[in-house]
């Protein structure tokens, strides 16, 4: 791959996109993962249980896809969290901290309250990586 070549990366470890977009694009060492909502990998349906359960599912799906994306959590530069339930931020953060424990330096993070998300989700997260 050349430095400016753009490639789309798919992962069979997670549910396929329901709309026309690239779930992951790499240009040089930059790997951008599109916003993910909490789709159950077994049936492709939105998980139940609220913002904490959705966040946990998104992070688990991300970890399933990392080998296909050729990055690790240590390569994660920033995560952007969008939620329709800012009142449940503590639940979102608890799921986040279950992954980003004291032995892993967490990425930069932004959280934004929004009025609606695709498929009725209450949480969507996008991720930017720099390959090491």
Image: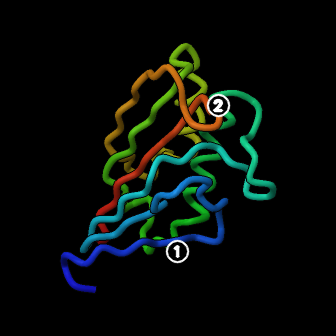
Q: Nearer the viewer, residue 79 or 39?
A: 39
The x and y percentages for residue 12 are 64, 71
Regarding mark 1 in the picture, which secondary structure is present there?
A: helix
Looking at the rendered structure, which numbered label has been put on residue 119? none
Residue at 55% x, 13% y: name it. 87
Q: Badge 1 local density, few (<14 within 10 Å), some, or many (20+)?
A: some
Residue at 74% x, 40% y: name it. 47
Is 13 situated above or below 90?
Answer: below
Is 18 situated above or below 37?
Answer: below
Residue at 19% x, 75% y: name it. 4
Res. 38 image quadrant: top right
* Drawn side of residue 12 relative to residue 32, left or right: right
Q: Which residue is mark 2?
A: 120
Residue at 73% x, 57% y: name it. 41
Q: Which residue is mark 1?
A: 68
Regarding mark 2 in the picture, which secondary structure is present there?
A: helix
């Amino acid at each position: 791959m050349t430095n400016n070549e753009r490639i789309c990366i798919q992962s069979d470890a997670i549910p396929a996109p329901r709309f026309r977009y690239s779930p992951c694009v790499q240009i040089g060492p930059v790997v951008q993962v599109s916003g993910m909502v909490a789709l159950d990998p077994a049936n492709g349906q939105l998980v139940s249980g609220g913002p904490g359960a959705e966040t946990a599912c998104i992070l688990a799906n991300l970890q399933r896809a990392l080998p296909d994306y050729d990055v690790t959590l240590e390569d994660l530069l920033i995560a952007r969290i969008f939620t329709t339930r800012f009142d449940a931020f503590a639940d979102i953060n608890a799921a986040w901290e279950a992954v980003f424990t004291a032995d892993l330096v967490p990425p930069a993070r932004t959280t934004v309250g929004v009025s609606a998300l695709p498929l009725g989700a209450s949480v969507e997260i996008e991720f930017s990586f720099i390959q090491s």
